[in-house]
């Protein structure tokens, strides 16, 4: 007698039903679509939707439908040509308030979306886009911090009237990068007083007394933990900044994620023209607000080739300008920046945070009718060939973008003029999204054209379908009715796997599709093990029902064992692999798990339904 | 339908010298080729630029190559794909030039040949990233092999079976490497993941055979080891071949229909599956036999366990 407990039937049925529901959205396919968001980041509403739709219908672009999802308007189109035309008309007519991006939208009915059922997102290799791997100069971030300590020490000592000769950075004994500062004091200086002053101002740093060639010194070395904290901070800050910038660009479904200890992985689906995007993403720029040094002559300083103490010489359109070293405010203190068209041409409206606003108020109150400069500072990395050797070095360009007379006292809100419209827009974007706390540069860059993406998905799906059909035909021929059971089980396995991947929101890539295909091939194994065992038992003269029971039971240990090793390989790839390779590993590992479930439970349930109970069976249709 | 209606009775054990010879020869060729010819590593591992382009009509390879050289690209490697309307171009690292600069330069060359030519994909991999991917791939291989060795050592009751399984596991990726080296097929990241899948999957058959060997010995401990091993392999033969045929069906579908991006991947799987089937039928059990496998090694009984036994 062949039995299968009722609760197991229920379990199998329930799991498969759930799987079908979760897998469902994937079977509808996608339409080319346009994602439209508000420039001011407010969520899209019906008013905005009507505005966009009016523009589209006004320009006779056929669209299939639209919906608002997570504050974004998605408009679906029948063809890529319609989609592109629509983007152009949105950009022409609504560019002032809205940002549009090319994307794809599922054709699944709205009711599925409402229940949070979504298809797997497609990887860049299946829909085209730009992949960037950025290296973050975390050591540069430590150098920056040292620099700010350096300035802080100078201020502290100057304020306390303690003389010092110089402060310089050096590489500590336990470090491979500069992580320490040395304050060089004149002979006979009050070492204790200097140390106490510095300690009081920087309670989290440790200071020690040393001696240099010219006299006593005070040394400060950052601990490995402090260095690490700074590096992590730089990385996290950069990720946030890159996210903000990507959002500002209006890319649909972007991914910005940490990779390893000092890398950031950026994936921008649908982006084709990489030059502009990369320019904005990788820009390390900040603003500095400084007063002009009107007590000294800039022309004289230029002739001498050096600026007087406490000032710095700049060049503004060929004219020398002396600015005070002392900062009023920097770009880091900005809380918002927007560009607009003002009376005097394009302008950037800036809002400072409390600290920056106070400082601005103090500085401008004392200096009305004097001039203040806005300095734009950009850091980039250049690679040059010097004598066959590749050398990289950081280049800092500083440019005065405006030098204007302070008309009245400013506080936390003011505007900057003197830029072109494009410059104003870009500056506002960069300031708004926050600065990169350390320079980044692309170490890997991959672009996949949309046509290749479409081709990849078409070929992948075709290989999957034809492969599965061939297996189905083969199994049906070779194992007859048992073969059909195996085929149903294989199908259930693909559905279950798709459901799991959809629930995990795993990105489907080409290797992922290959993983599904391979899973089909491997999943058959469990069924074959069982059926061959049943045949063997039958050959030994065992009754059909006993043969089925023995087949399942005796094949179990072989199924378990043979899957463990493939599972190990999958797990290693999952942990070590990245990108599309990890996608393959995820599919392979999950596929092995689901195939065990479907072969042992699903297959058994079906076969028991067919041959179970107290029926008398003459022969099994197992080929 | 049934291919194995009659129980087969192939004498695998008495002919094992022949199969050893074949394996040693194949592995020798593979290892030799690996050291002499090396692997045709893709930009994933070497760093550099890989461009895929589509033309509207057939294009002459030499024209494309000399065009690229004329544009200042050193040592361009041009390969036409399938139809001669698609080409893969490989360029050495371009000294920190970004993708869009390279794209513009390549497009200049393409448009001189075919004004409607299109760059369908462009990969720029820094040499540092390439080195890291290479060491990552080696680490993944080592970790997989290490974990599987531990599993084998714990799983089988005697080192004799473990050794057979380990040699069979090593056998397959070596042949895959050899084939990629001999044919100079581009060796990229997906190929590495296919190799890992092969390592995981090829043990599968060996485990099934060994399972059967243990079962047979349990049935009767007085049987001659040679007879038991032969019977076990023969009894599981239909299952081994059936599952491999089915897996090969889907992998061949992938190879034929999956497009260029999965060619190397599916090729590695095909070679690996064939090698894996061969090694688990002809090699792994034979090695166990030559290590002196007997019934008592597998059965926890009154027989005193030999000291060299693994748990």
Image (cartoon, coloured by chain):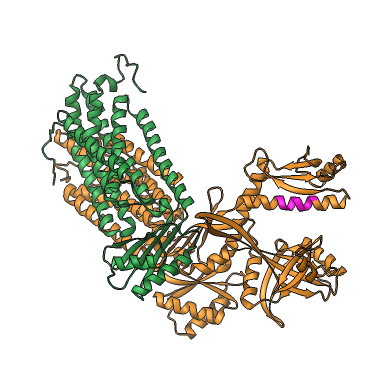
Chain colours: A orange, B green
Q: Measured from the top left, where is residue A222 in percent x and y?
A: 70, 43
Instruction: Say if B81 sits above or below B129 in the image.
Output: below
> In the picture shown, does residue A372 fall above or below A122?
below
Residue A548 inside the magenta-drawn segment: no
Task: Return the residue nearer the eye: B46 or A319.
Answer: A319
| Residue A129 horizontal side relative to residue A452, left or right | right
Residue A69 visible in the picture: no
Instruction: Give the image location of residue A392, x and y in percent.
Output: 56, 56
For the point 87% across and 48% down, the residue is A162
B213 over A205 or under it: above or below: above
Decide whether residue A150 is among the magenta residues: yes
In the rendered image, which quarter is residue A79 located in? bottom left
- Outermost residue toward the left? B6
Specify the segment rendered in magenta. A146-153
Is the residue A140 above or below the residue B199 in the image?
Answer: below
Q: Quadrant of the N terminus of chain A?
A: top left
Kindly report the secondary structure that dominates the magenta region of the rendered protein: helix
Snapshot quadrant of residue B205: top left
Q: Nearer the viewer, residue A513 or A210?
A: A210
Can residue A434 be spotted in the picture?
yes
Kindly indicate the quadrant of the structure image that contains residue A210. Answer: top right
Q: Is residue A370 left or right of residue B290?
A: right
Q: Count every numbered label the image shows and give the total.
A: 0
What residue is drawn where x is 13% and y is 40%? B4
Residue A365 x, y percent position in the rendering: 86, 69
In terms of depth relative to the viewer, which is nearer, A48 or B81? Answer: B81
Instruction: Give coordinates of residue A15: x percent, y percent.
Output: 39, 50
Residue drawn where x is 44% and y is 44% of the image: B135
The residue nearer to you, when weighing A155 against A364, is: A155
């Amino acid at each position: 007698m062949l039995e299968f407990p009722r609760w197991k039937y229920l379990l199998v049925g329930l799991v498969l039903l759930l799987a079908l529901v979760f897998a469902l959205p994937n079977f509808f396919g996608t339409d080319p679509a346009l994602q439209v968001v508000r420039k001011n980041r407010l969520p899209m509403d019906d008013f905005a939707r009507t505005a966009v739709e009016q523009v589209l219908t006004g320009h006779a672009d056929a669209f299939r439908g639209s919906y608002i999802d997570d504050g974004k308007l998605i408009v679906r189109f029948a063809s890529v040509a319609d989609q592109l035309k629509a983007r152009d008309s949105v950009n022409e007519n609504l560019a002032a308030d809205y940002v549009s991006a090319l994307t794809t939208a599922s054709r699944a009915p709205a009711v599925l979306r409402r229940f949070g059922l979504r298809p797997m997102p497609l990887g860049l290799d299946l829909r085209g886009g730009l992949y960037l791997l950025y290296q973050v100069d975390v050591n540069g971030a430590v150098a920056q911090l040292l620099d700010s300590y350096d300035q802080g020490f100078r201020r502290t000592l100057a304020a306390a009237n303690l003389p010092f000769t110089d402060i310089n950075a050096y590489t500590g004994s336990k470090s491979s990068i500069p992580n320490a500062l040395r304050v060089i004091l004149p002979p006979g200086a009050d070492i204790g007083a200097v140390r106490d002053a510095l300690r009081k101002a920087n309670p989290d740093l440790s200071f020690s007394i040393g001696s240099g060639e010219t006299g006593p010194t005070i040394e400060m070395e950052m601990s490995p933990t402090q260095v690490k904290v700074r590096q992590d901070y730089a990385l996290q800050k950069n990720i946030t900044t890159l996210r903000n910038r990507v959002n500002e660009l209006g890319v649909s479904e972007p991914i910005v994620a940490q990779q390893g200890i000092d890398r950031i992985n950026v994936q921008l689906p649908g982006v084709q023209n990489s030059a502009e995007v990369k320019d904005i993403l990788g820009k390390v720029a900040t603003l500095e607000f400084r007063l002009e040094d009107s007590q000294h002559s800039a022309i004289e300083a230029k002739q001498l080739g050096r600026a007087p103490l406490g000032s710095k010489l700049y060049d503004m359109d060929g004219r020398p300008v002396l600015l005070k070293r002392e900062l009023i405010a920097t770009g880091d203190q900005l809380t918002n920046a927007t560009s607009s068209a003002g009376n005097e041409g394009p302008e950037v409206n800036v809002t400072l945070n409390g600290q920056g606003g106070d400082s601005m108020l103090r500085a401008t109150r004392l200096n009305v009718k004097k001039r203040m400069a806005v300095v734009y500072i950009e850091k980039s990395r250049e690679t040059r060939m010097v004598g066959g050797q590749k050398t990289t070095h950081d280049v800092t360009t500083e440019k005065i973008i405006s030098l204007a007379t302070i008309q009245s006292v400013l506080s936390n809100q003011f505007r900057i003029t003197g830029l072109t419209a494009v410059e104003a827009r870009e500056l506002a974007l960069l300031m708004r999204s926050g600065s990169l706390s350390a320079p980044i540069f692309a170490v890997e860059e991959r672009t996949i054209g949309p046509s290749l993406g479409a081709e990849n998905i078409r070929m992948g799906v075709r290989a999957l379908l034809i492969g599965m059909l061939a297996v189905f035909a083969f199994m049906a021929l070779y194992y007859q009715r048992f073969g059909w059971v195996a085929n149903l089980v294989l199908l259930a396995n693909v559905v279950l796997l798709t459901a799991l991947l959809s629930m995990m929101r795993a990105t489907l890539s080409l290797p992922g599709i290959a993983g599904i295909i391979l899973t089909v091939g491997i999943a058959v194994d469990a069924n074959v093990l069982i059926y061959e065992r049943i045949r063997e038992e039958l050959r030994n003269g065992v009754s059909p029902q006993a043969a089925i029971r023995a087949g399942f039971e005796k094949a179990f240990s072989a199924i378990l064992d043979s899957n463990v090793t493939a599972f190990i390989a999958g797990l290693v790839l999952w942990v070590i692999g990245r990108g599309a390779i990890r996608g393959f590993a995820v599919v392979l590992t999950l596929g092995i798990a689901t195939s065990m479930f479907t072969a042992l439970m699903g297959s058994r349930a079906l076969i028991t339904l067919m041959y179970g109970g107290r029926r008398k069976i003459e022969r099994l249709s197992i080929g | 339908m049934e291919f194995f209606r009659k129980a087969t009775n192939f004498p695998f054990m008495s002919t094992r010298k022949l199969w050893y010879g074949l394996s040693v020869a194949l592995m020798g060729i593979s290892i030799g080729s690996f050291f002499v010819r090396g692997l045709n590593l893709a930009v994933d591992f070497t760093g550099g630029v890989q461009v895929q382009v589509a033309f509207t009509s057939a294009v002459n390879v030499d024209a494309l190559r000399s065009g690229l050289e004329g544009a200042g690209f050193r040592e361009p490697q041009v390969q036409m794909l399938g139809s001669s309307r698609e080409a893969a171009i490989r360029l050495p690292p371009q000294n920190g030039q970004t993708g869009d600069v390279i794209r513009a330069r390549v497009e200049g060359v393409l448009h001189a040949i075919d004004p409607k030519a299109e760059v369908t994909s462009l990969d720029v991999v820094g040499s540092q990233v390439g080195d890291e991917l290479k060491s990552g791939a080696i680490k993944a291989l080592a970790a997989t092999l290490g974990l599987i060795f531990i599993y084998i050592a714990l799983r089988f009751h005697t080192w004799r079976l473990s050794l057979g399984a380990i040699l069979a596991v090593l056998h397959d990726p070596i042949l895959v490497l050899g084939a990629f080296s001999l044919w100079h097929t581009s060796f990229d990241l997906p190929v590495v993941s296919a190799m890992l899948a092969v390592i995981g999957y090829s043990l599968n058959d060996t485990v099934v055979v060994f399972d059967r060997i243990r079962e047979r010995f349990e049935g009767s401990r007085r049987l001659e080891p040679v007879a038991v091993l032969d019977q076990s392999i023969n009894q599981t033969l239909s299952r081994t071949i059936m599952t491999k045929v089915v897996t090969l069906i889907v992998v061949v579908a992938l190879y034929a229909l999956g497009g260029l991006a999965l060619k190397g991947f599916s090729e590695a799987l095909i070679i690996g599956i064939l090698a894996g089937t061969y090694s688990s039928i002809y090699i792994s059990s034979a090695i166990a036999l030559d290590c002196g496998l007997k019934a008592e090694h597998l059965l926890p009984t009154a027989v005193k366990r030999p000291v060299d036994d693994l748990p």
